[in-house]
Amino acid sequence: MRSMTAYACVYKRKDSQTLQLILRSLNFKYLEVTIHNLPFHSILLEEKIKRFIRQKISRGKIEVYAVLKGHIDSEIYVDEKVLATYIHQAKKLTKKHKLSTNFNISDFLSLPQVISCSEKRTEENLILAAAKEGIGRLLEFKEKQGEAIRRDMMHNLGHLHRNIDSIKKTKLSMPQEGNGKEDINEEISLASFYLNKLEKNINAKTYTPKGKSLDFLTQEILRELNSASSKTKNKAISPLIVESKTYLERIREQAQNVE
């Protein structure tokens, strides 16, 4: 089980450049990823980070903040193969169309992919490494918080089980005067069925996104308890149902923070 709320921070250093990457996860129905402060030329890197997060996290609002300081010594690289291709094509076109061939090297250096800078690659590698480490730490935080939520849920679930068992055992919930209007056996049986499914889901060892299924099961249990409450007037059963709804509401609130 994972909590939707989490926090992680990573520091990285490369030569004279430092990077602080902060990741924050908040409650949200769906998955929404926002990345702030990346260099303007890192659009493709931003998509890589978002894709990596989507592979690891299924729900929540994920915010990533990058704080870069300093600079990296850069080297200029001329791709001679690309440059040669441009020159070859230019000569071919001038010959075909009988144009002037007075070319200057400066005419080609500004063309796409002829010149590259090592600084950009080093910077992106630094950010990507920090993002992967940060997401790993964020998941650890989510799992630690998720375990705390699971324990709280099981505590409330224990009270809920005991109340349902008490209602089941009492003979006062049987139909009165033969009309069956106050017979709540069906509602309690269904509530117990959903309760067992809820407990199994909470304690599942393998990780699967379960927040939505937990919310659905708590709604189903609440529906059956409300139906039972409206049918019975028994003074021994009514307080147990009301108390059960209180414990259930606590579980439902906790489920809102489960991924």
Image (cartoon, rainbow, N blue to C red):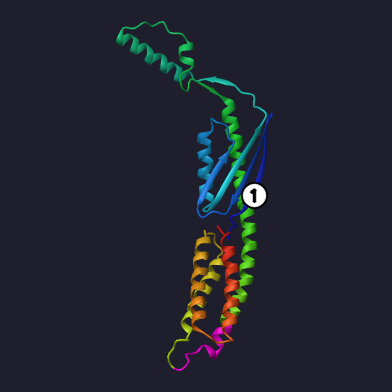
The quarter of the displayed image where residue 242 is located: bottom right
The magenta span reads 165-177
State the residue in front, 229 or 156: 229
State the residue in front, 93 or 146: 146
Q: Which residue is outermost to the bottom?
A: 177
Identify which residue is drawn at 56% across, 66% down.
252
Q: Quadrant of the N terminus?
A: bottom right
Q: Residue 155 location, x and y as percent?
A: 64, 71
Q: Does residue 148 appear to the left or right of 46 in the view shown?
A: right
Q: Assess disc 1: are there few (<14), some (14-19) or many (≥20) residues with their C-alpha within 10 Å of its C-alpha.
A: some
Please name the residue that numbered disc 1 is placed on: 7
Q: Residue 129 location, x and y as percent?
A: 60, 39
- The verdict on residue 174 being magenta is yes
Q: Residue 114 location, x and y as percent?
A: 48, 20
Q: Give the main secondary structure, helix, strand or loop, of the magenta stretch.
A: helix
Q: Residue 89 location, x and y as percent?
A: 37, 16
- Residue 227 higher or lower than 174, as above or below: above
Identify which residue is drawn at 46% across, 82% down.
186
Identity of the amino acid at label 1? Tyr
Q: Quadrant of the C terminus?
A: bottom right
Residue 246 at least partly seen: yes
State the residue in front, 42 or 136: 42
